[in-house]
Image (cartoon, rainbow, N blue to C red):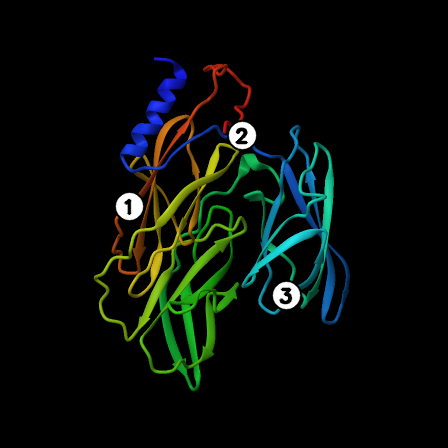
Amino acid sequence: MSRFASRVSTVLAALIAGLAAVMLTPGPAQAATAVFLKDNSWLTGYLGRMTVTNDGVDRMAAWRVEFDLPDGTTLDYSWNAVVTRTGTHYVITGASWNASLDPGASTSFGWIASGPGVPHSCLLNGGSCAGNPAARDVQPPSTPTNFRSDTQGNTFTLRWDASTDDTGVVGYELYTGTTSGPIATVTTTSHSMPIPPPMVMTFGVRAVDAAGNRSPFATLGLGTAPDVTPPGPATNLRLVNPSGGYFTARWDAPQDDQFVAGYEVALDGAVVSRVGDTTALVGLGYGTRFVSVRAFDGAGNLSTPTQVMISIDPGPSASATSKAPPTPKS
């Protein structure tokens, strides 16, 4: 059987089994940086600029910068880029005239901000804006512990014990089971608010590191019954953006009767990560691999797994001693 026929057979077998099959080869890590500067500032805001530089030897087909701004600061006007905002999280991609960069080239985009806060948790094409993809941070922080509440007067305070991380926690995000975005983002291990109305509700808190990795949620129920119902399965699992030996696994969040606390990500049946977001970096290597995701709630109930198969080919000229990086195949 020819090599091509063998590949086709592998793909067909996966489709017959009900799995998604993808034939891809990861490209080399993109050596690039995104540097922020505050060009001017005043009492109510500032003029910001970020410069993206391609320090690698290959042309960068596209760039994508992601960062968060602290509560109280918003990006109100921008230029030289396309900006999308979700809560305090901003995603910036290149405009038609500066989306790609040749080796050694750079481009800048800018904005006017209301408030004093500057970008944090900055990512460039999935890696650190500071560059050095070889030291890529893919490990999320640990789940906050001892999540609790207390009431004093008219103030309701949520407290938790600090998470740990291999590079350092930069903040915490607080959610409720009824909100799609965070109700607060803090750098301390507590958050105070007015006493909530009498109702059944669940709070969740997760830690975030500088690379944007998010821990599973710690959850706290107010008036909730014991949770014995697992979440539904994650849907639309896919593997995208091969870079530096990693693929980004993405999926759509399932429903739960109280609160989805996080996801177990497994490679060939072995759990490799527990995350609190609907994305995870997975190092795959070569060959046929199986990536699966299971949602879990605050009580530890696990959903049924969702699985995808991927077949990664090193290319016909690769060998055990070859040092040339593989190139993606469509």
Residues at circles 2 and 1 in contact by the CB criterion of under 8 Å:
no
- Give residue 88's position: percent from left, percent from top: 56, 62
The residue that label 3 is drawn on is 74
As measured in the structure, the alpha-carbon distance from the residue carrying label 3 to the one carrying label 2 is 35 Å
In this view, the residue in front, 125 or 80, is 80
The residue that label 1 is drawn on is 305
Question: What residue type is disc 2 on?
Answer: Gly
Tag 2's secondary structure?
loop
- Give residue 269's position: percent from left, percent from top: 29, 37
Q: Residue furthest bottom?
A: 153
* Residue plotted at (54% across, 25% down): 327
As measured in the structure, the alpha-carbon distance from the residue carrying label 3 to the one carrying label 1 is 38 Å
Residues at circles 3 and 1 in contact by the CB criterion of under 8 Å:
no
Position of 212 compared to 151: left or right?
right
The residue that label 2 is drawn on is 27
Question: What residue type is disc 1 on?
Answer: Pro
- Considering only order in the chain, which callout, 1 or 3, is on the residue closer to the N terminus? 3
- Give residue 249's position: percent from left, percent from top: 43, 43
* Residue plotted at (28% across, 57% down): 231
Tag 1's secondary structure?
loop
Question: What residue type is disc 3 on?
Answer: Thr
- 152 vs 112: above or below: below
Instruction: Give the quadrant of residue 20.
Output: top left
- Give residue 330's position: percent from left, percent from top: 50, 29
Q: Residues within 10 Å of mark 3 (few under 14, many from 20)?
A: many
- Considering only order in the chain, which callout, 1 or 2, is on the residue closer to the N terminus? 2
In this view, the residue in front, 259 or 154, is 259
